Structures are given as structure tokens and as C-alpha cells.
Amino acid sequence: MVKWWSKRTGVAGLGKLSRDFFDRDTVTVARELLGKYLVRMWQGKALAGRITETEAYVGRCDKACHAYGYKRTSRTETLFAPPGTAYIYLIYGMYHCLNFVTEPEGEPAAVLLRGLAPVAGTDTMSLNRFGKLPDGLTSYQKKHFLDGPGKVCGALALTRAQNGLDLCGNELFLWDDGGPPPPFHTGPRVGIDYAQEARDFPWRFYV
């Protein structure tokens, strides 16, 4: 697997993240995901990016989490799945958001992926998002290529159809190149003013 991945992207390293990586404290996972790589196999191509921004959501104590207080609905059911499961939901009726389920099965918690830096399959990601190759993008489009959860899902062709996907499989997975963790910033999460005291939790991590 290391040879396969390095041959296509120039990134070698330790390899695919195991379920044990996700089966831990959610805030820790959110922080340690920075600098890791998300890989999406799509139509025979590897689309990949280095993780630059994450947010942690913990249902047992976090009013910003969809499953706060262990609220179980058809939408939140995936949050109760085993760690290392993809939780994808739709916001505003148009944007998909990818999350990585964390902690033991039955504990509703996940890390929201907010940003990537593209490293492989950039042409395909650009076509998925804008219908044109990177050379045809405006400077604004290039600057904000993958700096939002909806943008990431659009580029990687991720929708609710991939909700519940095993992140330890071969279609969508995370990769550790063995490098040192990048310097990062911490702050409150975005767009959760409704969440009372939880809106101030410093659970957003970004490089």
C-alpha cells in the first residue's frame, strides 16, 4: 500500500489510519488529523488532500452536535456507528459535509472536515467543483479551492450516498506520511451561535 500511494502522489510514510486512531477522544483526533491525508478513490483516480482544518463535535456534552444528549434520529444514526465511519449530511439543501465518527460505538461524536490542501487528482477535483481545469480558475477560486466542508465534498464527489462508508476501506481513507505535526491554531467553531455555551468551545483546529 505504501508503494501504491507514494507512486501516485509522491507521499510515502506510515500508511492508512486504522480504526484505533478514531477510537479515541474526539478533540484529540480532531487535532491530530491536521497534516494527515484524505484519499478518495473515484472513477479509477486517487483524489487526495492534506487536512488543514477540523472541528470536534461530542454528543454527550456539546449542544452543537446533531446528536446532543444522545438524540437518535434517521439523520444522526451514523454518529452512533463504529469509529472510523464516514458521517455525511446535507446543509442548506445543497452542501454536503464530511465527518469522521470517533470514540466507541454508541458514543455520538465526530470530527468535521473543514479544509484540505490538494495533493493529487487536482484536475479532477477542479472539474468536479467548477467544470474546468485549474488553469481556467480565477485567483479567488484557486485561493478558496478546498477551504470549506461543502467545497471539499464537491471536489471529492462525496454525497449522502457515501454516508456510513468505512474509512478503513479502500474507497475513502486517511493516510499518515509520518511527518511531524504542523503548527496550528485553535479557536471556536464556525456557524454555531445557536449552541449556547458550546459555541465558545475551542474545538476548531487549523493550520
Image: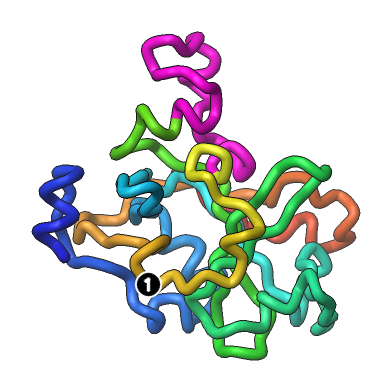
Relative height, residue 185 to residue 14 (above, below): above
Residue 187 pos. (x, y %) = 62, 49
Q: Amino acid at mark 1?
A: Gly
| Quadrant holding the N terminus | bottom left
Q: Quadrant of residue 2?
A: bottom left
Residue 202 pos. (x, y %) = 64, 57
Q: Is residue 147 magenta?
A: yes
What's the coloring here? rainbow
| Quadrant holding the C terminus | top left
Relative height, residue 157 to residue 200 (above, below): above
Q: Farthest residue toward the front? A: 43
Q: Which residue is mark 1?
A: 169
Q: Is residue 130 magenta?
A: yes
Residue 155 pos. (x, y %) = 50, 38
Would you say the magenta stretch is mainly helix, strand or loop?
A: helix
SS under mark 1: loop
Please indicate whether residue 124 sits to the left or right of residue 147 in the image.
left
Please indicate whether residue 85 sits to the left or right of residue 194 in the image.
left
Please indicate whether residue 180 sits to the left or right of residue 198 in the image.
left
Q: What stretch of residues is rendered in magenta?
A: 126-152
